Image (cartoon, grey):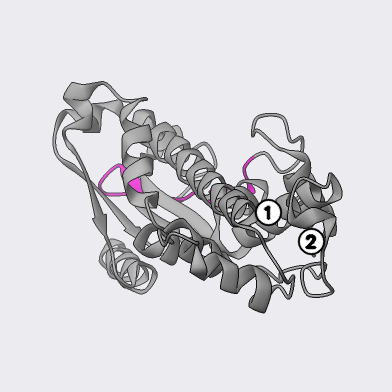
């Protein structure tokens, strides 16, 4: 299985040709690599994913409303915007920043996901890095320590939810081929969220383990696949060439 958890998200896995109703071509191995385009999951009905008002607001104001719903909840392009919506909502309730905002904070995409990563690992006594983000980057002066603590909690929650929801997609795909879990199976993962967002890798792995029996989960190996997209495309091209 190959996955991207980065600015966007997608996955591909080996599937039995017999299980793919639309497949009409030959396959000497009886298997094909299936491109899932799973970022679009639940985009039509919003029936399965745990959407919050902050997710709905992001989707409504995005350039592609009611599309890529799963991607918008777990990918690096969107997590900062979800957090910004949460900050503004709390400020509107006068629970954060004494109800204050700024022209910068009010602008969509003002809060990049990289700032959330920095906030998660800020363990300084006065949360100096978060103070810099709020007061310099977002231009909201005079933040209190409580403001910064709340900002850190928001950053942690948004990242943890993304990791857990990502794990659900991984677990669902692995259990689609349970016969493969009786022997070692590799899951190659590329992307900035997996590589760089603090705690993402560990939370994702532990969550996958909750959905798969321990005897099977011990056979699953998660590995960082640098330039997985490019390498994967080359492998598929090679396999297609051999098939023809």
* Residue 79 against residue 235 in the figure, above or below: above
Q: CA distance from mark 1 to mark 2?
A: 12 Å
Q: Nearer the viewer, residue 61 or 33?
A: 61
**Residue labelled with disc 2:** 62
* Magenta stretch in the rendered image: 27-41
Q: Position of residue 63 (x, y in %)?
A: 80, 65
Can residue 181 be spotted in the picture? yes
Q: Nearer the viewer, residue 40 or 157?
A: 157
Q: Are marks 1 and 2 in contact (CB under 8 Å)?
A: no
Residue 79 appears left or right of 96: left
Q: Position of residue 113 (x, y in %)?
A: 56, 65
| Count of residue discs | 2
Residue 180 appears left or right of 119: left
Q: Give me the disc on residue 82.
A: 1
Asked if residue 161 lies in the magenta stretch, the reply is: no
Give the secondary structure at mark 2.
Answer: loop
View extreme (bottom): residue = 136
Residue displayed at 55% across by 57% down: 75
Q: Position of residue 142 (x, y in %)?
A: 71, 68
Q: Nearer the viewer, residue 98 or 102?
A: 98
* Residue 101 against residue 183 in the figure, above or below: below
Q: Give me the disc on residue 213.
A: none
Residue 112: name its quadrant.
bottom right
Residue 180: name its quadrant.
top left
Q: Position of residue 243 (x, y in %)?
A: 29, 61
Residue displayed at 54% across by 42% down: 22
Mark 1 neighbour class, 10 Å CA radius: few under 14, some 14 to 19, many 20 or more: many
């Amino acid at each position: 299985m190959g996955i991207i958890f980065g600015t966007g998200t997608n996955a591909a896995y080996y599937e039995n040709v017999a299980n793919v109703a639309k497949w009409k071509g030959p396959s000497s191995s009886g298997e094909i690599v299936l491109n899932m385009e799973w970022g679009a999951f639940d985009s039509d009905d919003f029936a399965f994913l745990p959407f919050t008002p902050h997710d709905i607001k992001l989707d409504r104001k995005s350039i592609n409303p009611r599309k890529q719903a799963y991607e918008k909840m777990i990918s690096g392009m969107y997590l900062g915007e979800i957090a910004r919506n949460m900050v503004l909502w709390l400020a509107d309730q006068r629970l954060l920043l004494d109800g204050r905002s700024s022209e910068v904070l009010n602008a969509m995409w003002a809060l990049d996901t990289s700032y959330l990563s920095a906030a998660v690992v800020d363990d300084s006594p006065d949360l100096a890095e978060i103070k810099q983000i709020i007061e310099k980057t977002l231009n909201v002066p005079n933040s209190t320590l409580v403001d910064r603590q709340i900002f850190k909690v928001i950053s942690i929650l948004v990242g943890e939810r993304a990791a857990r929801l990502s794990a659900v997609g991984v677990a669902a795909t692995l259990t689609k081929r349970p016969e493969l879990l009786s022997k070692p199976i590799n899951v190659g993962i590329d992307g900035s969220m997996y590589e760089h967002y603090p705690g993402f890798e560990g939370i994702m792995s532990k969550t996958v383990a909750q959905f798969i029996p321990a005897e099977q989960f011990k056979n699953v190996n998660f590995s960082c696949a640098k330039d997985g997209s490019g390498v994967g495309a080359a492998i598929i091209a090679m396999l297609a060439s051999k098939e023809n």
